[in-house]
Every structure is written in structure tokens, then in C-alpha cells.
Image: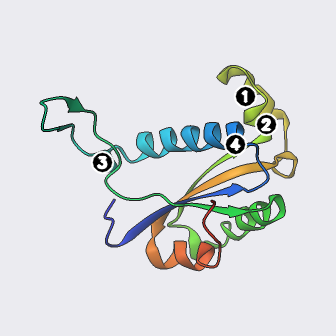
Amino acid sequence: MNPAEEKCVMVADEALPTGVLANTAAILGITLGARYPEVVGPDVTDASGVTHPGITTFPVPILKSDAEGLRALRQRLKDPAFQEVFTADFSDVAQSCQVYDEYEAKAARTPEDGHSYLALLLCGPKKQVNKLTGSMPLLR
């Protein structure tokens, strides 16, 4: 992933409680690192000689929307014009499960319109990501 040409953003439901929001961001961050391991920089050593594990080499702003806006964004991502944008989602279906096997089974029984999205992660060409999310404010 080239930060000069590509962009990643997370869009979260602004109504989420802080703990759920933090958990959702962590889960999608793990997905980002697994999908694009090259975005994690090398370990760094501080002036005291303490090593700190590598972190992301580019910013991932968290933008805000509401539940309807997330659903509409998820639908827009089906447009072939946005096929280069990688999308990961975290929904109520996933959040309600304790173990991954339970999530797999529950997702298999739940149609797409039965998912309420807590957040979406979008990574891809800057122009496309900006077209989808450029008017969304930062979550503060």
C-alpha cells in the first residue's frame, strides 16, 4: 500500500458507546494489519534503548456517520466504480458473538440486510475513498 496514492479510513456509527467503539476500531485495525502487513513499520528504538513494536506507517482517520449512513455507504461500495476499494465491516452480528465459530454460523444464517454495521474500513485509491467519505466529519 502506497500512502501517496492510497488511503484508509474507518467510518463508525457515532452513536456507539465508547467501549464498543474502541473495540470495533481495534478489530478493524487487526483486519487492516492482516490484509496489508506491509503497512506496519519496523520496530523502533528510543533514546533510552527501549524497543517499541512497529505501528502503522500512515494515518487511519476515524470518521463518523449514523447507522443509515453506514448502510448507504456499504451499498455504494457495490458499485463497480469502487471495486478497487477494500472494505471490511464490523456488524452487530459479529459483535454479538463470543467465539469466531459462532460468528461464522450466525453470519451464514443472516442475510446482508440483517446486519447493522457498527463501522466500515475502506482502503484503496485516494480519489475513490475521498469520493465515498470526503464529506464525512472526523469522529471526536
Residue 103's mark?
A: 1
Residue 93's mark?
A: 2
Spot occupied by residue 139 in the image (x, y as percentages of width and height) = 63, 60
What SS does tag 3 mark?
helix
Q: CA distance from mark 1 to mark 3?
A: 28 Å
Give the crowd class for mark 1: few <14, some 14-19, many >=20 residues within 10 Å: some
Q: Specify which label sits upstream in the sequence, 4 or 2.
A: 4
Q: Label 2 amino acid?
A: Val
Q: CA distance from mark 4 to mark 2?
A: 19 Å
Q: Specify which label sits upstream in the sequence, 1 or 4.
A: 4
Spot occupied by residue 4 in the image (x, y as percentages of width and height) = 31, 71
| Towards the viewer: 86 or 54 | 54
Spot occupied by residue 49 in the image (x, y as percentages of width and height) = 12, 30
Give the crowd class for mark 3: few <14, some 14-19, many >=20 residues within 10 Å: few
Q: Is residue 139 left or right of residue 112?
A: left
What SS does tag 1 mark?
helix
Which residue lies under the disc numbered 4? 18
